[in-house]
Amino acid sequence: MSGQGLLGIDLGTSAVKVLVLADDGTRLARTRRSYPTHAPRRGWAEQSPHDWWRAVCDAAHAAVADAGVPIASVGLSGQLNGFVLLDDRMEPLADAVIWLDIRAEVETVQLAQMADFPARTGNALSAICVLPKLAWLRAHRPELLERTKRIALAKDYILLRLTGELATDPSDAHSTAMTEAGGRHWSPQLCALAPIDPALLPTIRPATARAGRVTATAAEAIGIAADTPVATGAGDVAALAVGCGVVAKGRTTLTLGTAGHVVAEVTARRSEPTGGLWQIPHGVFGRDLWLGLVMSGGLSLSWFRSILAHAAPPDFETLERLASGVPAGSDGATFLPFLEGAATPYNRPDVRGAFVGLSSTHGTGHLVRAVLEGVAFNARQCVEALEHAGAASDELRLAEGGAQSRLWCQIIADVLGRPVHLIAERDTSAAGAAMFGQAAATGLAVEAIAQSMVVIERVFEPEINRVRALDDVYEVYRTACTRAMGC
């Protein structure tokens, strides 16, 4: 495949990220295109599948042109727990309901009483999951489901537009709460709770399987050759694990996108919830991951930036400069990063964020640093939950958009009290997607591909005095969290 590119497409929560990699992992091109999220009512979150496809075409076409090499394969990644209802022409019947949507809280409680989800899936049921959302539609929009001929998960809608084929992978399937542990088959018993006919759902195939080939129409839209092989791909968590090289024991990764993901490999499946962690099938077929989730990771900083000024919010470099002048611990200001609810370790989508300990002596820099530290504290809770579950590691890796902030990287190292290895390629879900594509096209093992492609750019070492100061603030943070949870 020398002289050719690997195209990776990651359909994220706020934007699609597209990479073209050489087969040694060198980035040849990177693009992204955003799309809006609509909230027709409080707690709802929807996106247009047409917006997704337009963004994918625009971003992929630009990336391919920038790379200037033929594309050998395509791989996919995408946000979990988003879905599209399709009619008999495989066209969307409505906007996609995405993972941030928690309208089905009542249905979640009802369904949790009807089945032992931890025993069957390894996870507690959440309003984030597709199953309760489909149950909500059955109760409130039955006419829409009656017209539905197929259901596509988020990234699988892009696969459909690229190849005309509809398939999904174990990681995406299992996250819906409609499969048993491992995610290899739809569960008729769990689907019946909505109720949803499993025949409406995509065929489940390995992430590295060749799901189809690019059609002539799609090839023209994205600027590559028709018949290019396309891998099934995986949900963003499984893809980022591969893109971060979490394919060998002893590695944990933290990514700071819109949400924060803390991921390690499962040592043994469990039949009960563990510290607010989720079990998700790995992009390496037959293996599993633990996921610790910071619902508002990079979103916390983006939100705070957006409210600082009405017309022209300061850029992120300015925010980092302001926070750099503030000592570790933010002089007593503490931020609870639960803007979209609290995931690990609490699993409380109803709880919201807060600043704690503010006084008139605090300025903008204090609040910026408190936001960075608050997200790092929640990430530490995820790491501690992973260790308690038996997934201790000797190497922590860091990537995605928030990792562009050297200050944030250092804060995370200081909060965790351990070295943090910064991955050279930030867009790790898109990188993992590209690796799936190469595996599908060549038959190579994706874990071997990841071992050869992932490069560590820099290691951030913790500084002992900041570690001690932040240990004290972490206890303040945990006490504030306990009060926020009503415990």
Image (cartoon, rainbow, N blue to C red):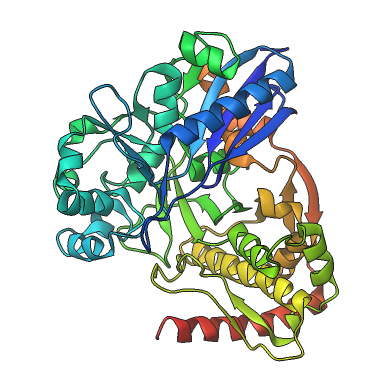
Q: Residue furthest front?
A: 311
The image shows residue 174, relative to residue 340, as above or below, that is: above
Residue 284 seen in the current view: no
- Please identify the quarter of the rendering in which residue 366 is found: bottom right
Q: Relative to 396, does residue 225 appear above or below in the rendering? A: above
Residue drawn at x 38%, y 71% is 350
Quarter of the picture holding the N terminus: top right
Name the residue: 79% across, 53% down.
459
Q: Is residue 313 left or right of residue 212?
A: right
Query: Does 30 sit left or right of 79 as displayed?
Result: right
Residue at x-position 68% and y-position 85%:
472
Counting labels gives 0
Relative image position of residue 355 (x, y in whole percent): 60, 80
Q: Position of residue 354 (x, y in %)?
A: 55, 78
- Say if 2 sits above or below 486 in the image: above
Q: Nearer the viewer, residue 141 or 108?
A: 141
Measuring 74% from the left and 67% from the top, which residue is drawn there? 411
Task: Name the spot of residue 487 as percent of width and height, x first.
Answer: 40, 86
* Residue nearer the viewer, 474 or 70: 70
* Coordinates of residue 298 in the picture (x, y in percent): 62, 58
Asked if residue 302 is positioned above or below residue 180 in the image, the reply reads below
Q: Is residue 177 visible?
A: yes
